[in-house]
Image (cartoon, rainbow, N blue to C red):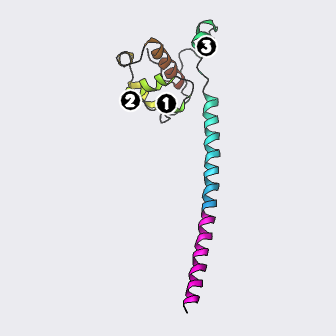
Amino acid sequence: MQGLDLVRLLRHTANQYEQLVLRNRKLDEEIANLKGQYEMDMKQIKSQVEPLPSPLDIHSAPAKPSTRIGIIEKKFPDTMPIAALPGYPTRVYDALRVNNVERVGDFPGLTVEALRETNNCGAVTIEQIKSLARRVGYPFA
């Protein structure tokens, strides 16, 4: 009788193992799908954000004429994390984080005075933060 019980136990264990293998394959497929969706979302975000010009290009590039004077169009939702906007140095993100600006909607509470009091936040970093704020639709002086 013990031989039959052992065979049943082995069959049951083998069935459980097969079910786990199938479940893991399905989870792997779901992970691959989520990675694909994430990459598509990141490509879409990056296509909406123009890269920051290098400091050498700022003075040599001709100014673009503005077609919409005085109107600022918001391109990004207020809940979007600032870190998702590529093209800025780490120092910019760090200065914003110190001033509790983690998302696009946090910009209205930010002031130049607060940035000046922030460690490692000089004139260049402040100008880059102003550029980022204009890009997301919250310019400040």
- Secondary structure type for disc 1: helix
Residue 45 against residue 125 in the figure, above or below: below
Which residue bears the numbered disc 2? 100
Asked whether the beta carbons under mark 2 and mark 1 sit within 8 Å of each other, the answer is no
Earlier sequence position, callout 3 versus callout 1: 3
Which residue bears the numbered disc 3? 66
Tell me which residue sits at (39%, 23%) in the image.
110
Q: Amino acid at mark 1?
A: Ile
Earlier sequence position, callout 2 versus callout 3: 3
Which residue bears the numbered disc 1? 82
* Quadrant including the C terminus: top left
Tell me which residue sits at (50%, 31%) in the image.
83
Magenta span:
1-23
The secondary structure that dominates the magenta segment is: helix
- Local packing at callout 2 (Cα closer than 10 Å; few below 14, some 14-19, many 20+) is few
Tell me which residue sits at (61%, 36%) in the image.
42
- Secondary structure type for disc 3: loop
Q: CA distance from mark 2 to mark 1?
A: 11 Å
Observer-nearest residue: 3 or 99? 3
Q: Amino acid at mark 2?
A: Asn
* Image location of residue 14, percent across then percent down: 61, 74
- Local packing at callout 1 (Cα closer than 10 Å; few below 14, some 14-19, many 20+) is many
Residue 8 picture quarter = bottom right
Is residue 20 a member of the stretch shown in magenta? yes
Q: CA distance from mark 2 to mark 3?
A: 31 Å
* Quadrant including the N terminus: bottom right
